[in-house]
Image (cartoon, helix red, strand yellow):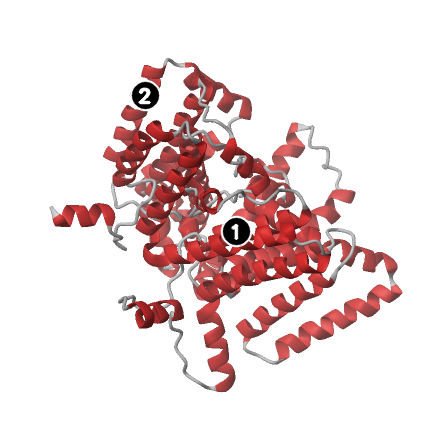
Amino acid sequence: MIEQLQHIFLYDPQKPLIFTGLYFWAFFAVVLVGYSIIYKDKAVRNAYLFAISLFFYYKTSGFFVSILLVSTLTDFIIGKRIYASKFLLNKKLWLSLSIFINLFILVYFKYAYFFTDAFNNLLGTDYIPINHFAYWSNSFFGTHFRFDKILLPIGVSFFTFQTISYSVDVYRGQVKPVRNILDFGFFVSFFPQLVAGPIVRAAEFVPQLYKPYSLTKVQFGTALFMILNGLIKKLFLADYIAANFIDRVFANPLTYTGFENLMALYGYSLQVYADFSGYTDIAIGLALLMGFTLPKNFNSPYKATSTGEFWKRWHISLSSWLKDYLYIPMGGNKSGSVFSYISLFVIVFFISVLAANIWVPIAIGAGMVTVYFVGKVLPTFREWVSTNINLMMTMLLGGLWHGASWNFVVWGGLNGLGIVVFKLWNKVSPWSDKDKWYNRFIGILITFNFITFTRIWFRSSDFDIASQVLSQITSNLSFNVAWDVLVGYQWVFITMFIGFFIHWLPSTWKEGYKNIFIKLPYMVQVVATFVITFFLYQVLSSDMQPFIYFAF
């Protein structure tokens, strides 16, 4: 009995609370029962969901819930101080404090090993990072947390970005501070989107805190459809092809032919989309059942005809966040700013540390000086640099957000380069008219293959693995074994074909079968949900894998 209660209420790092686990659906059923009792009182409802969200995060990440509470409390207080300040300087100082605290939390947990290794390499020391928060807790409160290793709290990037955007929006006058700490805590920690997004803006979500609960038949049908769609993407598409093919290839690329590496790369493009958008679909469906609307985070990204369009369709909440809180403050496509120079310094610093070579920052500095003087002589070139430099820096910082490694520098740089090159090409391209189906087809084909190519560095565990995958594809393609590979992994490739086929269906077709489900009688929808869910869990052939973006 005690062990069962511990399983229910205590954190188990081996069994975190995730959407695809059966325990989660039991948890959500209990949540809905309680919600059905208190939902009419908005204050009680918000407090209830805040408490539930904290429990969810505890079951997902253990006592890292304290970090979430610290971020919530500080930004709640700072948001009120920003709004109450009569002088612009005071507002800026409070905003700077919010950004500093959130970035400190993010950098501490995400880049502690990176900075420690850099310091050791520079001075020849052998310091080992420790979790100071756990150490202080053990010293002052008698807890027994492990402090000899710094683990990354799940979702830390998402909730810190969310609280930063809140402070910035209050500073800009786009939203008023949330009334009380319970409401604000609910906004920050709402469990469907807490650990992997979508990133929610205060202006979009806070007004929903004070609206009465409403769930129409269309919303109910949409919610069930999104949950089922997400589970199918995750369990049927992403997990199956990952466990049975992709993970095996990327674990040791040299033992597989170039053709197998290439197919694994295409498979990963499907996996990462099905995995991440599947999570988002489930999150949107869960939130809608409780009367809250989350923003759309994916819009058939592999239908994009350019790299720029791809990033308007992929992880939309992060792309728009980077645009509004990074790219535009830099100056957008017009000119640089003080923030541009700060961002440039951060990028050069990270690259220099990764290179561990004094000549790298010297070479970068020489390149910057050369660009400056060429721009003095050629105004057109200077204008082109001013238009695109902020874009490149935004993509590089987006890459470094995923992790401090050469893999993510290359991945972010290639995506930035892809956007810049397309902008140049589009000015002279004879195929720029996308109203013509064949031009659109060519654009989709090139963009999809380019994005898939960049995923070599995104998926590989380190730069050596990425180099091995690239080497196998370019020098050992071995088409002579293609048929044997296709037959040997026939169910994997059939699953991949189904996934890509559905993805590239016309949007009107997708809306059509979605609307058919929405219009079904309630009982038919519920029965269909149970049948499909039962089938999905029956066909699982391996342990469920964590969502990919939990790592970020």
Q: Which residue appears at 78% of the width and 56% of the height?
A: 335
Judged from this view, the residue extending furthest toward the bottom is: 124
The percent position of residue 228, horizontal first and vertical second, equals: 37, 29
Total tally of numbered discs in the picture: 2
The percent position of residue 546, horizontal first and vertical second, equals: 35, 48
Residue sitting nearer the eye, 357 or 64: 64
Quadrant position of the C terminus in the picture = bottom left
Residue 414 appears in the picture as rendered: yes
Tag 1 residue: 76
Q: Which mark is residue 532?
A: none
Residue 446 appears in the picture as rendered: no
The percent position of residue 472, horizontal first and vertical second, equals: 45, 58
Mark 2 / mark 1, whichever is N-terminal? 1
- In whole angstroms, how far apart are the C-alphas of marks 2 and 1? 40 Å
Give the secondary structure at mark 1: helix
Please tell me how crowded label 1 is: few (under 14), some (14-19), or many (20+) other residues with Cα within 10 Å: many
Residue type for callout 2: Val
Q: Which mark is residue 526?
A: 2
Q: Which residue appears at 61% of the width and 66% of the height?
A: 347
Please tell me how crowded label 2 is: few (under 14), some (14-19), or many (20+) other residues with Cα within 10 Å: few
Give the secondary structure at mark 2: helix
Between label 2 and label 1, give the one nearer the viewer. 1
